[in-house]
Amino acid sequence: MHTSTKQTAYSAFFALFLLGLVVTPAQAQLGVSGGLNFESAGDIETSRTGNATLDNSTGYHVGLVYELGLGAATIRPGFFYRRVGTFEFSGDVLQGETQFDVSSWQVPVDVRFTVLPTPLVKPYVLAGPMATFPRGEGDFGDATEDISYSLNVGIGANISIPTVSLKIQPELRYEFGASKFIKDDFEIGGTSFQPQDSPSFSAFGLRVNVIF
């Protein structure tokens, strides 16, 4: 998939998300969200051309969420930008730039279940799939897959603030990578790399959603 095709995919997902805001019923609520992600996605290991380490792996994520209540369960799709970290290639493998930032666009669909329906603070558990569109900077753009998939699980609390009609949702999350985000074969500056075990996204996350 070329860059233009990737951009088309991002635009299509964002358009579908905005369309959902228009056609969903009144009990649905829009929110903003952000937090920190502590990556453990793994390094790039090759047999001949050297390795790359995922440094600076404490990143952040910001985006929009949209809640739709369905009785005991709540469905919450989202659209996020995520800063992942920096891959640094070791030794004299590359001429010139040896550090490359990685970020992504993400489309999670969380399903959360209230476990204790107290009046103002309602603890919950959540789980759901996520599609991720990785982005590597510069020459590293050819190293990332077009799309990868993950599963999110977590716990949180829905805190109602009646005086301002807001809901605050602090969460602890964990992402299990279901598919790799680094290709099995890529080239940077004329040097070819064939990772022995391409890493997948894996991270703990701290997030706060503010639902209007």
Image (spheres, rainbow, N blue to C red):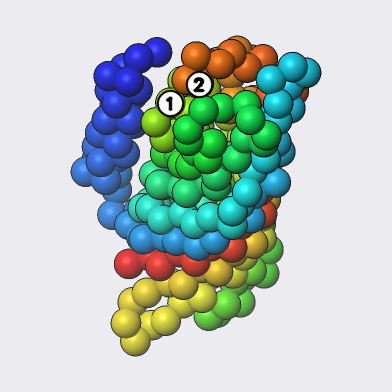
From the viewer's perspective, is 35 left or right of 155?
Answer: left
Question: Does residue 131 sit above or below 83 in this rendering?
Answer: above
Secondary structure at numbered mark 1: helix
Question: Does residue 204 sit above or below 86 in this rendering?
Answer: below
The residue carrying mark 2 is 188
Question: Tag 1: Cα neighbours inside 10 Å, few (<14), some, or many (≥20)?
Answer: some
Q: Is residue 165 visible?
A: yes
Front residue of 21/37: it is 37
Q: Amino acid at mark 2?
A: Ile
The residue carrying mark 1 is 139
Q: Residue at x 48, y 35 (%)?
A: 97
From the viewer's perspective, is 118 left or right of 134?
Answer: right
Q: Amino acid at mark 1?
A: Asp
Question: Does residue 184 sit above or below 199 in this rendering?
Answer: above
From the viewer's perspective, is 139 left or right of 6?
Answer: right
Front residue of 88/156: it is 88
Q: Residue at x 25, y 41 (%)?
A: 18
Front residue of 186/28: it is 186
Percent coordinates x, y for residue 13 in the rendering: 33, 31
